[in-house]
Amino acid sequence: MIKKVIRVLVVDDSVFFREALRYHISREPGMEIAGEAADAATAVKRIEELNSDVITLDIEMPGMNGIDFLKKVMPGYAIPVVVVSSANKKVFDALGAGALDFVVKPDRESMGQTLFFNELKVKLKIAVTANRSILKKMNNPYGERSLNKHPQYGVIAIGASTGGTEAIFRVIQDLPANIPGIVIVQHMPPVFTRMYAERLNNSCAFEAKEAKSGDRVYPGRLLVAPGEYQMRLKKAGDGYYVECNKEAKVSGHCPSVDVLFQSVAEKAKGDAIGILLTGMGKDGAEGLLEMRKKGARTFGQDEATSVVYGMPKVAYDIGAVEKQLPLQDISKELLKILGIL
């Protein structure tokens, strides 16, 4: 439950940026600045002195950088962190090191724009609801196992939001190279969806890429919906492909999990598996329900392992989830129904 007043610790080496955050956050009802720090050493002191609920963290700082700060300092403190950084691949290193979410830092000329500050304040409010007792590291227990030559399912659809970048990785990292085609919506802005796909491509046994219209869905390929585009599954003959269009938000998001899942329900029916992971709100719940009604297998992440038990909870409550599982068990369940375990 969100506290009446959310106390924010700002960690950033830029005096200008700290002042801007102080100005906007202190004027938000129910939020206040607990303190500020220009470097990691000062941040540690502020954490120990202050009763902060959430931290905004810059990555590039003098001395210890933000990623090392997350790895070496934050495991000792149960305080959620939202990274504020430029469009840089290091954001994903920060998420892998324990940050819950990120916001793209505007340039100096854009600091007067309210969009950035509104997004940051929303993500700070979400962060304080997060479950911090989540295992971040898992071993690969599956070795070099592979699928049967003719898998029973043609497409796996995955949706996630807050905490989802790492949750998705934990699900797919152990899957074999010839896994059925995977389509993913992770709430994320443009540029970052491409970088995230590249990260997955470098970390998994199969191809991963940011989707574009016309991309085929086939075994051994993973497609990530591009930021600010709605992605839908389409059918052509015996196969599938995706269509990506600039459209309005659905369920508050673009890309939207509901848009993807509803298209999978329509085009793939019982030839699909749907997985809804951690995230605030309800995007994906109705789509997952539609998938289940059309014969797809459907799974949701449980409360204990969800960073934010919002989207999977709504899906579970409305009967969209066939089976609710801890994050570390979802890949095992996939391997079972695909004939590997």
Image (cartoon, rainbow, N blue to C red):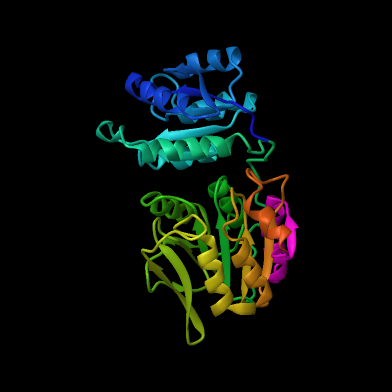
Does residue 300 appear to the left or right of 99 in the view shown? right
> The N terminus is located in which quarter?
top right
Asked whether the viewer can see residue 160, the reply is: yes
Does residue 55 appear to the left or right of 247 in the view shown? right
Residue 28, position as x, y percentages in the image: 48, 29
Residue 9, position as x, y percentages in the image: 51, 22
Residue 271 within the segment the image draws in magenta = no
> The C terminus is located in which quarter?
bottom right
Residue at x-position 66% and y-position 35%: 132
Asked whether the viewer can see residue 13, the reply is: no
In this view, 274 is above or below 92: below
Does residue 284 appear to the left or right of 212 in the view shown? right
Residue at x-position 58% and y-position 22%: 52
In this view, 40 is above or below 184: above
Residue 325 within the segment the image draws in magenta = yes
Residue 325, position as x, y percentages in the image: 73, 55
Does residue 182 appear to the left or right of 113 in the view shown? right
Residue 81, by quadrant, is top right
**Magenta part of the protein: which range?**
319-341
Residue 32, position as x, y percentages in the image: 52, 23
Residue at x-position 54% and y-position 15%: 46
In this view, 260 is above or below 128: below
Closer to the camera in the image, 162 or 218: 162
Farthest residue in the left direction? 109
In this view, 162 is above or below 218: above
Closer to the camera in the image, 97 or 271: 271
